Image (tube, rainbow, N blue to C red):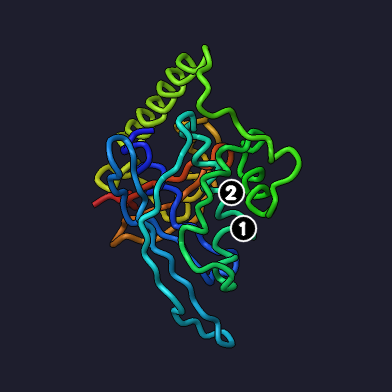
Amino acid sequence: MTREELEEIFAAEFPLKAKNDLAELAFVELSDRGIGRYGVVVRLICWADDHGTLSIRDVKEQDIFVDVPDDCTFERLVMYLRGDGHGDAGCVGLAGGRHADADDLLDWSALELQKAETVEDFDKALRMKSRLGKYLLLRSVGRKRPERTERRVRERDARQLVRDRERLAKLVAGGAADHPIEVASAAVIEVRAGAMPCPQCEGEYRVIEHRSEGPGRRAVDVACRRCGTKRTLWFRIVDDEPN
C-alpha cells in the first residue's frame, strides 16, 4: 500500500473516539521507516469526568509502526479502522484506564483474521481476548498465490477509480466552496443534499451537519447510507427577487 493511500485512509477515518467520549485517537502524520515502510504518528487524548465536568487526564503522542499485511486492500484497512472505533473495543478501554499506550489501540494482527471483513466483524474480533472460533483462522501470509498479482492489479485499478470519482465530485457544482449549488432558500438545502447520489455507489446521503459559512453560504456534511463515504456539499442562497 502506497504512502498516498495510507495518508488518504488515515486522514479520512481518524479520529477514533471512545463511545463515552472520554478518549480520542487522532492522526498526526506518517513517518518514514525505510523504503516502503511507514509509521503512523497518533495523538491519544484521555479526559476525566468529574460529575459532568471534563478535564484532560492524559495526552500522548506516539509513532507506531504500520504493520499492515502486503495483501491488505484499501477497503479492508478502512473496515478495520472503523471496527476499531465502532464499539466497546479500542479507545473505550483506554478511557477506563486499562491501557497505557496509544499503540494498544492499533492491533494490526486483526488484519490477518481470515473471516473478518466488515466493520462488525473487526469490532467483534477486537473485543475477543483470545479471538476464538472463526476469527482465529489467519489469512495466508508469505505464500505466493498465482492469482495474487491479477487480484492486486484489479484492486489497484479499483482504488484509482475511487480517487478519480472523488476528484470528479469536487469539480461539479456543490463539490467545493468556490462553486456551490445555488438555491433560493435555506429550507431546501437538506432536501437537495439528500436527493443527490453518492458518486461512488449512487446511494442516498444522510445529513450529518448543516452549518453556515458566512452570509448566504452553507456547508452540509453528509455520509452515504450505502457505502459510508463522507463529504461536504456547498450551497449559496441567492435572492431570486427582481432588482
**On the rendered structure, is 27 left or right of 146?**
left
**On the rendered structure, is 131 left or right of 147?**
right
For the residue pair 178 and 90, the one nearer the viewer reads as 90
Amino acid at circle 2: Gly
Query: Residue visible at 55% across and 55% down?
Result: 85
Residue 211 sits above or below residue 117 on the image:
below
Residue 140 sits above or below residue 19 on the image:
above
Residue 52 in which image quadrant: bottom right
For the residue pair 130 and 111, the one nearer the viewer reads as 130
Amino acid at circle 1: Ala
Q: Badge 1, how many Cα within 10 Å: few under 14, some, many 20+?
A: many
Indicate the secondary structure of the residue bearing disc 1: loop
Position in image of residue 143 (x %, y %): 53, 22
Query: Residue visible at 41% across and 28% down?
Result: 159
User: Decide: marks 2, 1 in contact (CB < 8 A)?
Assistant: yes
For mark 1, what is the residue? 89
Residue 49 sits above or below residue 243 on the image:
below
Q: Badge 2, how many Cα within 10 Å: few under 14, some, many 20+?
A: many
Position in image of residue 45 (x %, y %): 44, 69
For mark 2, what is the residue? 83
Q: Is residue 218 visible?
A: no
Q: Is residue 103 visible?
A: yes
Residue 191 sits above or below residue 212 on the image:
above
